[in-house]
Image (cartoon, helix red, strand yellow):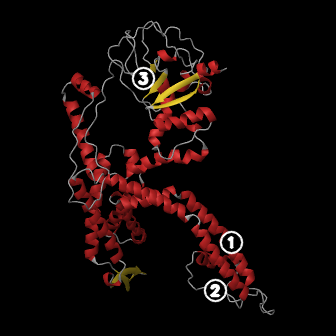
Amino acid sequence: MGLSDDKDRIVINVGGIRHQTYRSTLRTLPGTRLSWLAEPDAPNHFDYDAKIEEFFFDRHPGVFAHILNYYRTGKLHCPADVCGPLYEEELAFWGIDETDVEPCCWMTYRQHREAEEALDSFGGGGLLDLGSEDPEPEPEHEDDDEMTRRLAQGDSPDVRSSSLWSRWQKRVWALFEDPYSSKYARWIALASLFFILVSITTFCLETHEAFNPIVNRTETEVLDNETVVSTYQETETAAYLTYIEGVCVVWFTFEFLMRITFCPNKFDFIRNALNIIDFVAILPFYLEVSLSGLSSKAAKDVLGFLRVVRFVRILRIFKLTRHFVGLRVLGHTLRASTNEFLLLIIFLALGVLIFATMIYYAERIGADPNDPRASEHTQFKNIPIGFWWAVVTMTTLGYGDMYPQTTFGMLVGALCALAGVLTIAMPVPVIVNNFGMYYSLAMAKQKLPKKKNRHIPRAPQPGSPNYCKSSIRCSCNCTQNDLCFPTEGYEKPWSLNSMSGMSGDASGVSSVSALPCSPPCLMQHSHSPIPSIM
């Protein structure tokens, strides 16, 4: 019995840490990389040391302990001290599906993907940090395919014009879209910020009495062959505020046209909410200017409507999200806390309905018998009026326009206030945690230095586990510790049909000579578990 156990036992060295298990344990998950080690010919295909009888993998030892425990217990947990992308890469290497992660660890495993999306949107540093050194422009490197295409086509005028447009399109687009791409883009962003603030200030000042003097207007009408001159008064905005707004609109128009002309994807540009706000805020000014010279009644009605629609100019404040990371943090927090806000609204709606009904009937206790409606002594005439009181009380605002006057009504009011505090306090910690997470990601992105050195991977050397063992010409698409299969006169020992049951025939593997193939096979990364273990 002991001899059988020793024969079934297998030693796996991962990153210098030796792990011992049984081959029967590895067979519990067929089609994975570790299940291949249980095959009799596994030493021929992996880095195996016959002297100490162990397999070696240069992978993360801490993650492998959790993966090996998955074979033993059937439950896959995610370590809290390992970064999400690293754990995802290790799962792909060992051929384990990410959906096997236990529900208790799923949110921890998925959190890194949301963090990566947030980091992409938090690019760049502070807009007003003009004294800092600009990052050195990275040299433009062309890949081999692009170089081959250019050499094949030659320097024709079409090619030169196409490359010239592509180069200038990227530069101009970055100039107006990314405030952190260069020093000039930062100055343009500051100019845009200045005009936004001036436009909003002008919009607010136009409503002040000092900038809206009352003027007398005369209107001449012909009634029954008689000319009637009528005089009326109306407010007129100061002319210099209109000129200031016109200058701001000219800048916004220029910026919008440049961005839509040089944007790489017109469809995505049109669908963007901020771009829609830009267009809607610009259009009423031009329509108002074009209709201001007309005297017809219809034109005046349209002009009056456009003056009401001018409130959309205040939406330009959302353009500041391009220039301030803090506003983007707030946007990500609101988007990530949608479920919590929905839960808060449901709680408030239930509380409002319950306490509005309770206050309506509580205020009628002890009413005057001669009052048929029982509402002369109270302000709560009906339940819909109580909705407003319940909302104001539960949110702890307390305007004082409505208040209970009976003892039972005061008791209901006290319960309503306490319930409102508890209702609002429950979802708020989740929203605060989301804000803290995105804020820390934004600060980390700003302080993260740019990577300047590009490391070129070294070609596998003779004797390494990544070096091809066949002298026959091979078509290799392998990762670390994978096999290289020749393309002529050789059949892969593990086919797609044999992955699940490992029943394929691998008799031809030992006949291949262990000579280096030319050229050596480089490592290729794959996100899919299947290609990484083929």
Q: Is residue 237 visible?
A: yes
Residue at image position (51%, 17%) is 42
Give the residue number, with chain letter if any, for mark 2.
Answer: 403
Helix, strand or loop for disc 3:
loop
Q: Position of residue 427 (x, y in %)?
A: 57, 63
Pick whichever, 298 or 463, lies toward us.
463
Mark 1 closeness class: few <14, some 14–19, many ≥20 residues within 10 Å: some
Pick whichever, 141 or 78, lies toward us.
78
Q: Position of residue 470 (x, y in %)?
A: 39, 11
Pick whichever, 510 or 291, lies toward us.
510
Residue at image position (55%, 83%) is 399
Q: Amino acid at mark 3?
A: Cys
Closer to the chain start, of discs 1 and 3, is 1
Place residue 184 in its image quadrant: bottom left
Q: Nearer the viewer, mark 2 or mark 3?
A: 3
Pick whichever, 473 or 261, lies toward us.
473
Helix, strand or loop for disc 2:
loop
Give the residue number, with chain letter if any, for mark 3.
Answer: 478
Q: Residue furthest right?
A: 369
Q: Amino acid at mark 2?
A: Tyr
Q: Amino acid at mark 1?
A: Leu
Residue at image position (59%, 21%) is 6
Mark 3 closeness class: few <14, some 14–19, many ≥20 residues within 10 Å: many
User: Which mark, by number, is residue 353?
Assistant: 1
